[in-house]
Amino acid sequence: MARLNTFPVSVKVAGRRIVIVGGDGEALAKARLAVKTSAEVVVFAAEVETDFSGLEVTVIERAVEAADFDNAALAFVADHGPDGARALEMARAAGVPVNEVDVPENCDFFTPAIVNRAPISIAISSEGDAPVLARLVRARIEAMLSPRLGELAQLAGAMREKVAALLPDGVFRRRYYEALVTAPAIEGALAADRGEAAADALLALHAEAKGGEGVVWLIGAGPGAEDLLTLRAQRLLQEADVIVHDQLVPGAVVEMGRRDAERICVGKAKGHHSFSQAQINTLIARLAREGKKVARLKSGDPMVFGRAGEEIAALRKAGIEYAVVPGVTAALAAAADTATPVTLRKVSSGFVFATAHGADDGDLQHWAALAGSGLTLGLYMGKSIAADVARRLMEHGVSAAMPVGIVVNAGRADKALYAGTVGALAAGEIEFVDGPAVIFVGEAVAQGDWARAETIAAVAERVA
Ligand code: SAH
């Protein structure tokens, strides 16, 4: 992810002043922004060319002086002449962050587009690059949020002491607040001026139930791109108290959880077994028993080579509530990346997803028969043994001309494609790029769009 060159913060301005230097339309625009706060807004201009009446600002008709910056929290300079230049110097000397309107190089800070639901504010900033885009984003957010959001926030604030007394556990407290700000009944009660009574009633319910039981959600994170996550997965990640994830789940997806959610990486990358499967089973059951909502995040689909079966068995044995949220499995992401139909009328009547890792001769024989009868094979965990698998498929009767396609890092920006035949794969010693891979074998594979794929050539052909 690109890094920000500015850091969004909220500056305290209550009881302080915001100084605006300049008397034209630019100054007026900043004055309009500044009066959204409770700061004292003071405009200094030797010549006032526009009408500030109707805004709660003090207009002083003279050039600004050093003393005017006393107790200022922020300053805007909308005068690009010598008075403005002096104002910049004085503000800096007084240690007041300053913004020269539309001159980014003279700005200590930028003003974001603001969605105001005091005490909640949402700032959308483009670091000065694309203010129009920032305003469009603001319009969307405005439309999304209840106009009562500010009242809800105030209500939550007013409940704080009572909630702390009745719900000492942080997890249950958070759950109460979540219910408070999302329940339509509370919004209705606010409209009827009965907000606090409704909040009290909800609190009594939560105190009685002690916040309820824990749960484990087995969530598929998809092949790696954040936007291939389901909306349900995204919502539950936001709700989870703990996120227990595998190594293969990309950081950006793990980041989508709440900022204060605990995150536990249980490893399981090839070669790093930091947690055994038994330890994982015990861990998620224990967390749920503590009353926590656990997101067990797995790459792809949790039910495909994800050992979900074992985790579910452990949860059922312990009597813990669970749910499975599907994700895009690697082979289907690979099919999408290459527009390969894994089923195709008159060519492939079905597909088989299998793990090449640990496959014995009986498995290979079986798959060879399936591929021979027109099914598409999607082999997981087979990149390092790809040539060997191809060779053994041929031994069991798969034709050397049978199409093969391999996708490394499917569903991600850094995907790499390789295409050829079983014969070429068996003979070639191909160097794949790093990353997990799916190997397709079958007649339907040739129908995919592998134009950007590197050709898997047999060693003999390469030499020739
Ligand atoms: N539950 C996962 C599979 C986990 S097993 C799923 O449904 O996709 C790990 C194997 O999945 C890897 O060895 C590789 O074969 C495959 N895999 C996972 N992510 C992949 C990706 N982005 N591209 C290609 N293959 C991937």
Image (tube, rainbow, N blue to C red):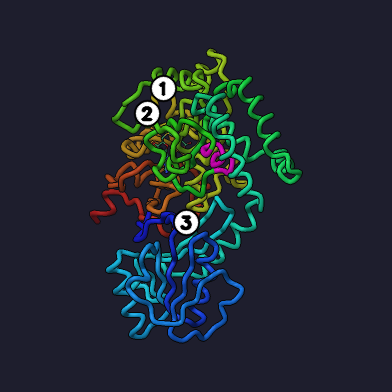
Q: Quadrant of the N terminus?
A: bottom left
Say what secondary structure mark 2 lies in: loop
Q: Residue at x 53, y 71 (%)?
A: 57
Q: Position of residue 240 (x, y in %)?
A: 51, 33
State yes or no: discs 2 and 1 in contact (Cβ < 8 Å). yes
From where the camera sits, is residue 370 visible? no
Against 79, residue 402 (above or below) is above
Most distant residue in the top direction = 317
For label 1, count other residues whose C-alpha is less than 10 Å away and answer few (under 14), some (14-19) or many (20+).
Answer: some
**SS of the residue under disc 1:** helix
The three-letter amino acid code for the residue at tag 2 is: Val
The residue at the point 52 percent across, 74 percent down is: 29
Residue hosting label 2: 266
Q: Give the labeled residue for mark 1.
A: 280
Above/below status of 144 relative to 360: below
Q: Could you tell me how far apart the alpha carbons at marks 2 and 3 are, in whole angstroms?
A: 47 Å
Q: Residue at x 44, y 26 (%)?
A: 363
Q: Residue at x 66, y 49 (%)?
A: 148
- Mark 2 Cα within 10 Å, few/some/many (few <14, many 20+)? some
Q: Earlier in the sequence, mark 2 or mark 3?
A: 3
